Amino acid sequence: MRIFFIVFGIVCVILAGLGVLLPGLPATPFLLLASYAFARSSKRMHDWLINNKIFGPILSDFLDRKGIRLHIKIISLVMMWSMMLLSVFYFIENDIIKYVAAGGAVVGTFAILRFKTIRD
């Protein structure tokens, strides 16, 4: 079971990394799943994730303070909408897929905005 959780955690970290770049794919839920999986399987991997300079602050804010910092929300929304608009206008030709991408961005926006904003 330990190996399963380690592999699952690694997959979740990869998906979180993709979530930073791709519209409609959120990073935070995958970070939470990775944290859970690593806490169950590998102290070293869990410590790495918590102390990671990119994912660590986001994860600790969410777990400890139950929210997302304002600048992270802004960066997330700008990146998500930029990538979605770039994809829809330049890379995606199928109209149905364009609507799916736009819908994913709308859902992602509501998901980000519904969390408490941490102002430091």
Image: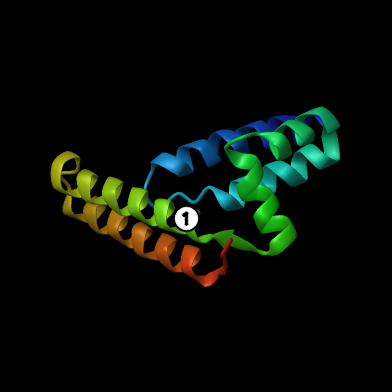
Identify residue for label 1.
71
Q: Quadrant of the C terminus?
A: bottom right
Residue at the (65%, 34%) spot, across then down? 52
Q: Is there any visible trace of residue 1 in the rendered image?
A: no
> In the rendering, at what x and y percent does residue 103 appear?
33, 62
Q: Is residue 115 left or right of residue 60?
A: left
Q: Which colour scheme is used?
A: rainbow
Question: Based on the displayed image, in which of its 4 quarters is residue 39 positioned?
Answer: top right
Badge 1 element: helix
Q: Is there any visible trace of residue 56 in the rendered image?
A: yes
> In the rendering, at what x and y percent does residue 8 appear?
68, 36
Residue at the (76%, 46%) spot, across then down? 36
> In the rendering, at what x and y percent does residue 109 appear?
41, 63
Q: In which quarter of the image is the N terminus?
A: top right
Q: In this view, does 18 lie to the left or right of 62?
A: left
Q: What amino acid is at disc 1?
A: His
Residue at the (81%, 28%) spot, across then down? 44
Please, is residue 58 above or below residue 115 in the view? above
Q: Is residue 15 left or right of residue 23?
A: right
> In the rendering, at what x and y percent does residue 57 appear?
64, 46
Please, is residue 85 above or below residue 14 in the view? below
